[in-house]
Amino acid sequence: MRASDAERDRIADMLREALAEGRLTADEHAERVEGVLSAKTLGELEVFIQDLPAAHERRASPAYIPAPNRPTDAIPADPDDNVVAVLSSAVRKGRWRAGRRIHAYSILGTVEIDLSEAIFEYRQVVIKAVSVLGNVEVRVPENVSLRGTGGGVLGNFEVDTVDSTDADAPVVYVEGWSVLGNIEARPKRGKLVADILDRVNRKVDKTLRKHLDR
């Protein structure tokens, strides 16, 4: 696979750390950096750090895989929940169960879908949003992934792309169309999915117990 500039920079940073730690001489560092800058593939880059601790740490850590741009699970065509606002407002927030598909329609109104405290029973949730001279706002916890597909006609469609560091975290897909209206989705700062936190805490507790038992 061809190497990107970001990957070359990452390998160069590892070499710089190795030089600072005394693992490489100045001549070795200069020679390897020169090779990194001219490397064309990822395999060529790995050669320059294969005798350094950083290479073994990279192999030990699981590969980071971003969330797909489209749902991979079978999502039903019929919604589990309809949120409709016509010349009014409609809100879903608090502790509620998020289904696999949610439809939100705003016509001269405001729809708020707040998933920051929701119970995620499914790993993938699709929100279909339509706004005509209205407003649809979606808020998600910070530790889930977020994707968006859509657009606007004299309107706004804005979804922050977010990748969770947890491979098992839920993924929220916002699909929509805005006509003279607004659709936006972003994380709600300070809000986290509780079951992900519990799983992380269990991992930390297990690691601490292992160290204490030694």
Image (cartoon, grey):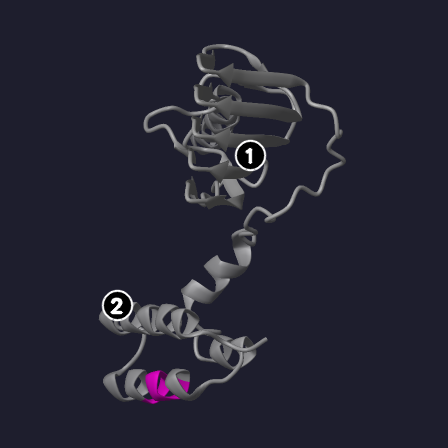
> Which residue is labeled 1 in the image?
172
Looking at this view, is 20 or 132 the one in front? Answer: 132
Locate residue 31, reporting x and y percent: 34, 89
Amino acid type shown at disc 1:
Val
- Residue at screen point 34% across, 74% down: 12
- Residue that appears at 46% across and 17% down: 117
Mark 1, Cα crowd under 10 Å, few <14 / some 14-19 / many 20+, is many
Q: Which mark is residue 21?
A: 2
Residue type, mark 2 in image: Glu
Magenta highlight on residue 79 = no
Quadrant of residue 128 in the image? top right
Q: Residue at x 50, y 16 (%)?
A: 86
Up-down: is 147 above or below 82? below
Considering the whole magenta stretch, tell me its main secondary structure.
Answer: helix
Closest to the observer, 22 or 85 = 85
The magenta stretch is 31-35
Q: What residue is at 48 percent from the left and 33 percent from the top? A: 207
Helix, strand or loop at label 1? It is strand
Location of residue 11 with respect to 164 vertically, above or below? below
Name the front one of labels 2 and 1: 1
